[in-house]
Amino acid sequence: MSRNVTVGADGSASSLDAVAWAARDAETRGLGLRVVHVLARPLGLPLDAALPRTIREYVREAADAVVREAADRARNEAPGLEISTLVLPGEPVGVLLAQSRTAEAVVVGHVGPTQFARPLPGGTALGIATRAACPVVVVRQGAAPTGPVVLGVDGSPAGAAAVRFAFDQASVEGARVIALHAWTTWNAPLPPPNDPSEAYASAPGVLAAEEERLLGEALAGMRARYPDVQVERRSVQGPTRPTLIEASRDARLVVVGSRGRGGFAGLLLGSVSQAVLQHAHCTVAVVRGSPCEERDELRSTG
């Protein structure tokens, strides 16, 4: 299978929701679906430990049952979808990172009882999202499949990939985009003592206009490329975490970049990324920039 959406399956309800999301997405895009399960090891045994035949057979049978159930769920969502299944040894993050090199997207569940489903932010989903070679979609169990696609915009070169992904996703799903840019006044000039000059008094307004301009530049060309997608631009003065999480309440998907600066700086490097992945009320997509975009971002930040 060449072009595919890859989904991690572990038998949990959360991973089955991820399978359903991945199947619908693959069908809509005309792609195949690749279901991947990491072969479980008995608790406490290293990966290279020899196992008695009866235990090996039991573990393999359990793994086969997981991928069969996942494939059945996918077929129920998208009859006629081309589906392949893989049962691979290893650890979940490493296995899915390897699979991401040949996938259009990797999809995992938000939480569940086994390998693919440790509670975020310290588990499999965050590990994959920070290093995958393709977009990573973390599906929240029970999230509504309706509402807008919320796009976190920071204006960085690396964030351009997230913009393209959000508009493409909105187009194939028939959704509108809310392009959200959060900013604060920390970088506005502070007035010197006893100087009520108009320049300093107007600084917040100047900053707001500049942030609005940045948002417009980040979205440049998207209306022409996706004329079917309605866009609502929001340049919001406020902290990033609560702004983005609150916007996720009525969304079907939140899309963020894996690098960036400004309003959504360091989304996968600290508390903001952890908060978005753990507390967003909907499915979250994390999109890395291309190598060239990421090199540009590194140069621009020194």
Image: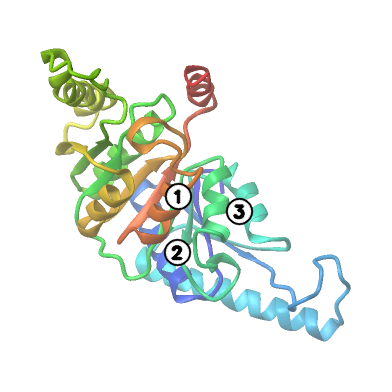
Q: Is residue 31 visible?
A: no
Type of amino acid under label 1: Ser
What residue is rendered at 17% in x and 15% in y?
A: 195
Type of amino acid under label 2: His
What residue is rendered at 41% in x and 60% in y?
A: 278
Q: Give the label, 2 or 3, closer to the camera.
A: 2
Residue with the mark numbered 3: 96
Type of amino acid under label 3: Leu
Q: Residue furthest bottom?
A: 54
What residue is rendered at 56% in x and 65% in y?
A: 116
Q: Is residue 60 visible?
A: yes
**In the rendered image of this protein, does residue 35 appear above or below residue 31?**
below
Quarter where residue 102 is shown: top right
Nearer to the camera, 281 or 11: 281
Residue with the mark numbered 2: 110
Residue 40, position as x, y percentages in the image: 69, 72
The tag earlier along the polypeptide, 1 or 2, is 2
Quarter where residue 49 is shown: bottom right
Q: Secondary structure at mark 3?
A: helix
Q: Give the label, 1 or 3, closer to the camera.
A: 1
Nearer to the camera, 252 or 229: 252
Which numbered dot is residue 271? 1
Residue 203, position as x, y percentages in the image: 18, 20
Separation of residues labelled 1 and 2 (CA atoms): 17 Å
Pointer 2 local density, CA inside 10 Å: few below 14, some 14–19, many at least 20: many
Q: Secondary structure at mark 2?
A: loop
What residue is rendered at 43% in x and 42% in y?
A: 267
Residue 214, position as x, y percentages in the image: 26, 23
Pointer 1 local density, CA inside 10 Å: few below 14, some 14–19, many at least 20: few
The tag earlier along the polypeptide, 2 or 3, is 3
The tag earlier along the polypeptide, 1 or 3, is 3
Quarter where residue 91 is shown: bottom right
